[in-house]
Amino acid sequence: MISLQTALTFFGIALGLAVAPGPDILFVLTQSALYGARAGLVATLGLMSGLFFHTALVAVGVAAIFQHSPTAFLLLKAAGAAYLLYLAWLSLRAGAVLAQGKQDAFIGYAALYRRGVFMNVTNPKVTLFFLAFLPQFCSPERGSMVMQIIQLGLLFLLATGIVFGLTALLGGRLAMWFNTSPRAQVIMHRLAALVFAGLACSLLLTV
């Protein structure tokens, strides 16, 4: 069991990391700006589910496979980048539909949740980050390392949920304006496509 001091220190750091610009928070912001705060909150739940997956991998030691196998790491990165490019194409297509004066159909909350999960799970950098970061706050003297990593992972999930939830509410306020302007919606879809394409390139080019 981690100590209270360790938990508070880790939670503060996790909040800072969650606030830092990254693919997940940009995903929440764009989706909530397009479809409203509820959509952003659902996307947040999907991303948090993905983070729990990464925590579990680190806890059982599977993350070492990605650390020591360049092939496995590259394949997962390629899958993640391909999915981000697919999301970019969907956003461009939605923008084109709006530009033609047609109504953009909401993809649904279940699909949005799945997007969040898949987007996070297929980013091996999150697993490697957890593998390097979480054990620093663990101590063999305090019992099971696996349980300590799970506790830290849950604290990271809580910090992420708070920050991303607030981001979703902010994006929801933007959606109230975008929904009254078809042109603004087209621009937002194109911006989302640019964000997804940029994240795909970043995922492929970074080591």
Image (cartoon, rainbow, N blue to C red):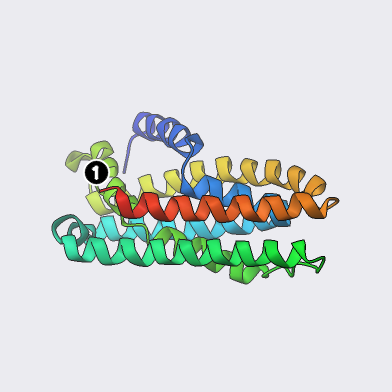
Q: Is residue 142 left or right of residue 50?
A: left
| Depicted 181 relative to depicted 15: above or below | below
Q: Residue drawn 44% across and 30% down?
A: 12
Secondary structure beneath label 1: helix
Q: Is residue 130 left or right of residue 156?
A: left
Q: Is residue 116 left or right of residue 152?
A: right
**CA neighbours of label 1 inside 10 A, class few (<14), some (14 to 19), many (20+):** few
| Depicted 105 relative to depicted 200: above or below | below
In this rendering, the count of numbered labels is 1
Q: Residue drawn 29% across and 43% down?
A: 134
Q: Residue drawn 55% across and 65% down?
A: 89
- Please tell me in which quadrant of the rendered image residue 55 appears: bottom left
| Depicted 61 relative to depicted 154: above or below | below
Q: Residue furthest left?
A: 68
Residue 102 at what x, y percent from top left? 80, 69
- Please tell me in which quadrant of the rendered image residue 64 appears: bottom left
| Depicted 52 relative to depicted 102: above or below | above
Quadrant of the image for the N terminus?
Answer: top left
| Residue toward you, 159 or 66 | 66
Residue 85 at what x, y percent from top left? 47, 63
| Residue toward you, 152 or 22 | 22
Q: Is residue 67 left or right of residue 194?
A: left
Q: Residue drawn 61% across and 62% down?
A: 91
Q: Residue furthest right?
A: 180
Residue 192 at what x, y percent from top left? 59, 53
Residue 142 at what x, y percent from top left? 23, 41
| Amino acid on which disc 1 is placed | Ala
Residue behind mark 1: 132
